[in-house]
Amino acid sequence: MAFHPIAADDDCSGVGVTRTYAWIVFALTFGLLISDYMSRQVLNAVFPLLKGEWALSDGQLGLLSGVVALMVGLLTFPLSLLADRFGRVKSLALMALLWSLATLGCGLAQDYPQMFIARFMVGVGEAAYGSVGIAVVISVFPKHLRATLASAFMAGGMFGSVLGMALGGAIAAKLGWRWSFAGMALFGLLLAVLYPIIVREARIAPQRASLAVNKAAAAVQRPLSTLCSSRSVIAAYIGSGLQLFVGGTVIVWMPSYLNRYYAMATDKAGGVAAIIVLCSGAGMILCGMLSDRLCRHCPERKVALAIAYCLGSCLLLSAAFALSAGAAQLLLICLGMLMAAGTTGPAGAMVANLTHYSVHGTAFATLTLANNLLGLAPGPFITGKLSDVIGLHAAFQWVPLVSIAAAAVFFYAKCHYHKDIARLAGERADDLESEATSGVKV
């Protein structure tokens, strides 16, 4: 039976897991991520119905979407740190239970304040899932697959968005918007029960589970310093967050855009928007695979590709929203979204390579913090406010320009990446030497 070595960077003592079990872990963790985004993005499909039923402004609708990303941004770091300490598998199951119950609460909401509170709790439940989930995934696969795994795993967010908007719109058209939320909640609850039964902490992280308590403080202090110890890792956080301002905004507002400018009904608008999001998810995976293929012997190329993805998406989306409604515009939006999330794989690989493996959950939490506070939270809200003043089409014309700032930040990372990688490698060598002389595993 074939085994994967657990990806513990330079630690050669990791215990392997079977390939079959590794892919089972990936599939279940991926499935929960799909549930996460189905619960988050189903709201976008029913924007037109809520706007009409409760007489809401675009700013209010944008806040219902943005509050989830805001809570994810604010809570991802502390909750991921707790998950790293007290068990990632248990933490993931509890998160899924909370966001699924909160999604059910959205379907029961009777007015805007109740819906806001329910969405707030969805954000609390989802806060650390992406960061802790990807830490679980990369722990059971070889190190050289990190960009592919990071992009493929995070693409689950896109596929969850697709299902959330497509199914949400279809269910709302047949049964009403409340049942859209109920359907997403039931799917999440089922996976939340199955996950801890099949995925076991001792099997995916045996070397971490066996650490003595009296060694924990010594083992954590230095690795934590790697979270923000280099200019290139800080730039990776910021560049990734700025780029997701663009992709996240288009995903949230596309069903409403199609409803207003293409006169599509809720179910059709959700379906077409789902195809656009699917392009983004496919692009995320393809761009991540391209990064791993082209950059195995030249890590700096990952950063250069991230810059190219930023500039390419800016060009295509700017051209798309300069056009009026029609087939040409939709084609350019699809192509632009194919590249818009392409930075996810390279940014995830940069963060993994520039931080210590023992705090990867917290490192990806920091990345998630930047993604949400710089991109996913302010993007829909700012665009909604602009839409109230100048219209949604005009607001969309400004959104792609943020990619230029993201490209500039990634260029700054490229200037320092090689030096920072070399410095971290030296620190790891010092740790191994210290371990050999003192007998304490760091």
Image (tube, rainbow, N blue to C red):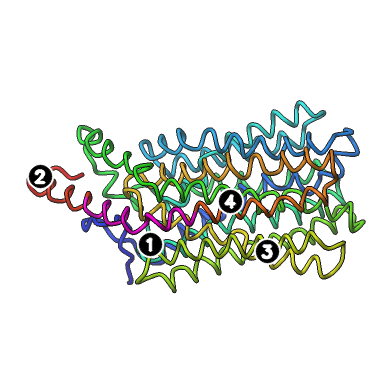
Residue 319 rendering spot, x and y as whole percentages: 75, 64
Q: State the predominant SS element of the stretch in magenta.
A: helix
The residue where tag 3 is placed is 315
The residue where tag 2 is placed is 439
Residue 230 against residue 258 in the figure, above or below: above
> What whole-number distance in Å separates the C-alpha atoms at marks 2 and 3?
55 Å
Q: Earlier in the sequence, mark 2 or mark 1?
A: 1
Few, some or many residues within 10 Å of mark 4 (<14, 14–19, 20+): some
> What whole-number distance in Å separates the C-alpha atoms at marks 2 and 4?
47 Å
Type of amino acid at the residue the image marks with label 1: Phe
Residue 80 sits inside the magenta stretch = no
Q: Provide the residue span drawn in magenta.
A: 410-426
The residue where tag 4 is placed is 405
Residue 25 rendering spot, x and y as whole percentages: 45, 57
> What whole-number distance in Å separates the C-alpha atoms at marks 1 and 4?
33 Å
Residue 91 rendering spot, x and y as whole percentages: 46, 39
Q: Which of marks 2 and 4 is nearer the N terminus?
A: 4
Q: Which of marks 3 and 1 is nearer the N terminus?
A: 1
Type of amino acid at the residue the image marks with label 2: Gly
Give the structural element (helix, strand or loop) at label 2.
Answer: loop
Q: Which of marks 2 and 3 is nearer the N terminus?
A: 3
Type of amino acid at the residue the image marks with label 4: Ala
